[in-house]
Image (tube, helix red, strand yellow):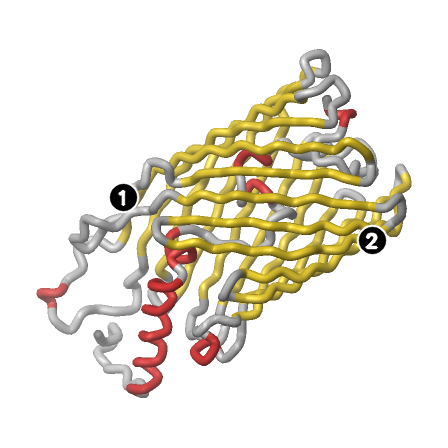
């Protein structure tokens, strides 16, 4: 390849081989990243994990922004940004149920050719209380989306015209579904379990004459609970497993959360946690909840065989979430009684 002005670029051979090997290894050992967007934070923007969590909040709306920068030591590192919105449209107190709609718009880019995906998903969820005390809920959701995958060739041209690129992008439709269960018998304990499946139709993303490139089905199992012993400190253990094609990602960990203020007009909490993704990375995260806002930061430290190539530089993640509520009080219950 050469630049448009006709001059050839001279690069260090060993550096080229190292970067090439690194990218190939990424695609072979971490196809979850090459197939779908990937965020390590699981609770702050939950519909990125499972569409059934649309509507699992107290308020008239929830809006989020997530950003991830991965392996910054590599030229043109992986960058992912996602925006989410959720709005409950029906809440029937007498029937103890409701309907929520949600949307996800995301963009994922990497490399000098900006290879990646831009897509938008629409979510429709239905949730219902399984008991008259509103301490036990089940939610189901369906998801449909449209996207485009490909790369850009603005600043390059092929030396051999016979290698002219006929197509550098592919559009696709994708469908998904999710189910989630929530249980909170008292103010000191809750449990959330979820199961989701995405790319259930395995959409084709082939281009460049290929015929076997597709987004494989992706399944996720999620479990989270919180325990408080009547005080201001909560412990929140977590476990999640993601499977896509022949590959699996498992993560376990625990967060702590300290409630500084829970008054009706001033809600403040801070949190910190340590997680481990099996044979891949250690994660540390910090969060701040201030009235209707949530701010969260995470560092994903690479512990895999990619460490020499990534120079031990992992990934940074950021989440900002806003919940539209009538007052500053944010109930700790994922599905608090007042909304039903």
Residue drawn at point x = 75 percent, y = 30 percent: 336
Q: Is residue 311 left or right of residue 21?
A: right
Above or below 156: residue 141 = above
Q: Which mark is residue 264?
A: none
Q: Nearer the viewer, residue 24 or 84?
A: 24
Q: Is residue 269 left or right of residue 116?
A: right
Q: Nearer the viewer, residue 73 or 139?
A: 139
Above or below 159: residue 45 = above
Residue 287 position by quadrant: bottom right
Residue 328 position by quadrant: top right
Pointer 1: what residue? 204
Above or below 213: residue 196 = above
Classify mark 2: residues with Cα within 10 Å, few (<14), some (14-19) or many (20+): some
- Tag 1's secondary structure? loop
Q: Position of residue 56 (x, y in %)?
A: 65, 33
Q: Quadrant of the N terminus?
A: bottom left
Residue drawn at point x = 37 percent, y = 43 percent: 217
Q: Choose the circle earlier in sequence order: 1 or 2.
A: 1
Q: Position of residue 322 (x, y in %)?
A: 69, 43
Classify mark 1: residues with Cα within 10 Å, few (<14), some (14-19) or many (20+): some
Mark 1 vs mark 2, foreground winner is 2
Q: Are marks 1 and 2 in contact (CB under 8 Å)?
A: no
Q: Position of residue 291 (x, y in %)?
A: 80, 44
Pointer 2: what residue? 258
How far apart marks 1 and 2 lie (CA) works out to: 46 Å
């Amino acid at each position: 390849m050469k630049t448009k002005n006709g001059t050839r670029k001279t690069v260090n051979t060993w550096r080229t081989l190292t970067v090439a090997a690194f990218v190939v290894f990424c695609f072979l050992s971490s196809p979850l990243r090459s197939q779908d967007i990937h965020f390590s934070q699981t609770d702050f923007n939950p519909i990125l994990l499972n569409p059934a969590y649309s509507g699992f909040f107290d308020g008239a709306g929830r809006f989020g922004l997530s950003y991830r920068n991965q392996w910054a030591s590599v030229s043109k590192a992986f960058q992912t940004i996602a925006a989410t919105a959720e709005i409950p449209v029906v809440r029937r107190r007498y029937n103890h149920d409701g309907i929520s709609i949600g949307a996800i718009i995301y963009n994922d880019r990497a490399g000098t050719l900006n290879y990646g995906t831009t897509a938008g998903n629409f979510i429709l969820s239905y949730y219902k209380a399984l008991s008259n005390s509103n301490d036990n809920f089940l939610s189901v959701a369906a998801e449909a989306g449209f996207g485009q995958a490909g790369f850009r060739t603005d600043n390059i041209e092929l030396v051999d015209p016979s290698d002219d690129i006929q197509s550098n992008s592919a559009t696709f439709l994708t469908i998904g579904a999710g189910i989630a269960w929530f249980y909170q018998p008292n103010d000191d304990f809750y449990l959330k379990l979820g199961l989701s499946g995405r790319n259930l139709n395995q959409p084709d993303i082939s281009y460049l004459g290929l015929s076997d490139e597709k987004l494989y089905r992706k399944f996720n199992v999620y479990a989270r609970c919180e325990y408080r012993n009547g005080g201001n400190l909560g412990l929140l253990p977590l476990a999640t497993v993601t499977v896509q094609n022949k590959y699996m990602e498992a993560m376990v960990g625990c967060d702590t959360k300290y409630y500084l203020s829970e008054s009706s007009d001033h809600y403040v909490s801070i949190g910190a946690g340590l997680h481990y993704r099996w044979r891949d990375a250690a994660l540390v995260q910090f969060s701040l909840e201030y009235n209707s806002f949530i701010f969260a930061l995470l560092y994903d430290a690479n512990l895999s065989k990619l460490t020499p190539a990534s120079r031990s530089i992992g990934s940074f993640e950021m989440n900002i979430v806003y919940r539209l509520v009538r007052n500053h009080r944010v109930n700790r219950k994922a599905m608090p009684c007042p909304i039903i």
